[in-house]
Amino acid sequence: KAALEASTRYLAADLGPQGIRVNAISAGPIKTLSAAGIAGFRKILGYVEERAPLRRNVDQDEVGRTALWLGSDLASGVTGEVIYVDAGYHILGMPEPPESWE
């Protein structure tokens, strides 16, 4: 994660003079068909929903709309940023996982 964030900043600095914007989206857990194959994923969704400031998870549409915004002229002054689309969960840090996950 740190490497992705650092790469985003470095690329933004290097490509900015050419008018190229570089940003990243860090999404929270999203209920998808492929995520269904991850052991304990439902518990992760429930855990995030209980603790995120907005008390919910995000969906694919929210992440997609964020990408559309970043690619549009509405975000023409935004570069080098990591946009979190996770109902605010990232501001909490990573609290101790429940014992039931073990």
Image (cartoon, rainbow, N blue to C red):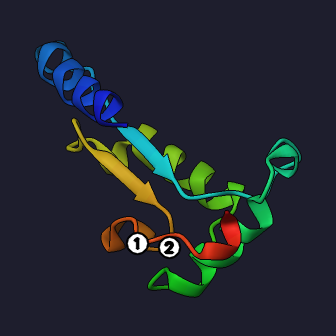
- Can you tell which quarter of the image residue 6 is in? top left
Q: Amino acid at mark 2?
A: Ala
- Circle 2 is placed at which residue position? 87
Residue at x-position 61% and y-position 74%: 99
State the image quarter where residue 3 is shown: top left
Q: CA distance from mark 1 to mark 2?
A: 16 Å
Which residue was labeled with disc 1? 95
Q: Amino acid at mark 1?
A: Pro
Q: Is 38 rendered above or below residue 90?
A: above
For image coordinates 55% across by 58% down, the residue present is 28
Which is nearer the N-term, disc 1 or disc 2?
2
Q: Residues within 10 Å of mark 2 (few under 14, many from 20)?
A: some
**Horizontal and vertical percent position of residue 8:** 28, 28
Residue 48's spot in the image, x, y percent?
A: 58, 74
Instruction: Tell me if 24 is positioned left or right of 100 in this view.
Output: left
Q: Secondary structure at mark 1?
A: loop
Q: Quadrant of the rendered structure where residue 19 is? A: top left
Foreground of the two, 15 or 5: 5
Q: Position of residue 50 (x, y in %)?
A: 59, 86
